[in-house]
């Protein structure tokens, strides 16, 4: 991915109990993105939400397992995201996948400076 300019945001909504080959689906998606050479991936855990089945998933102190919503976000060049979509489609049995055009303002890697 270039340092700045147009890109595509792939956003994948799943549940934290969703699995792919005996591991967390969110983790499996991040590992697949890494394997496919995408620029980066982030997993966000929601505290409440519902999806196509209209079942509310929420975090309560008395609940230990509640199938909370998870969002996997991946930003890269459109061509790389499009090439990765068949992998995502194979892995998702329950969830939502969206794409949107974004502008990357800054993308840097490397050693973090001491502060």
Image (tube, rainbow, N blue to C red):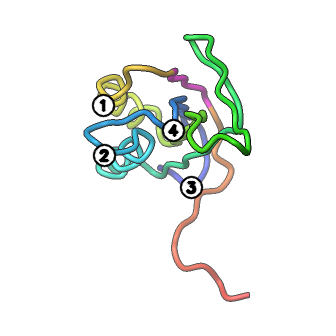
Q: Return the residue found at the far top.
A: 53
Coordinates of residue 27 in the picture (x, y in percent): 41, 47
What is the crowding at mark 3: few (fewer than 14 residues within 10 Å), some, or many (at least 20)? few
Is 97 part of what is drawn in magenta?
yes
Of callouts 4 and 2, which one flags the residue occurring earlier in the amino acid sequence?
A: 4
What is the crowding at mark 4: few (fewer than 14 residues within 10 Å), some, or many (at least 20)? some
Q: Residue at x 65, y 83 (%)?
A: 113
Q: Return the residue found at the far left.
A: 21
Q: Are marks 1 and 2 in contact (CB under 8 Å)?
A: yes
Residue 111 in the figure: left or right of residue 45: left
Q: Residue at x 60, y 26 (%)?
A: 100
Instruction: Assign a secondary structure to mark 3.
Output: loop
Q: Are marks 4 and 3 in contact (CB under 8 Å)?
A: no
Residue 20 in the figure: left or right of residue 25: left
What residue is disc 4 on?
Answer: 16
Q: Which residues are magenta?
A: 96-101
């Amino acid at each position: 991915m270039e340092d700045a300019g147009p890109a595509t945001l792939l956003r994948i909504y799943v549940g934290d109990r969703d699995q792919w080959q005996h591991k967390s689906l969110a983790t499996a998606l991040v590992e697949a993105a890494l394997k496919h050479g995408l620029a980066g991936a982030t997993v966000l855990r929601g505290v409440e939400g519902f999806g196509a089945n209209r079942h509310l998933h929420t975090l309560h102190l008395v609940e230990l397992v509640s199938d909370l919503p998870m969002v996997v976000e991946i930003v890269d060049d459109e061509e790389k995201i499009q090439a990765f979509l068949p992998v995502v489609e194979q892995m998702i049995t329950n969830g939502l996948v969206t794409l949107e055009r974004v502008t990357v303002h800054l993308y840097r890697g490397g050693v973090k400076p001491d502060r």
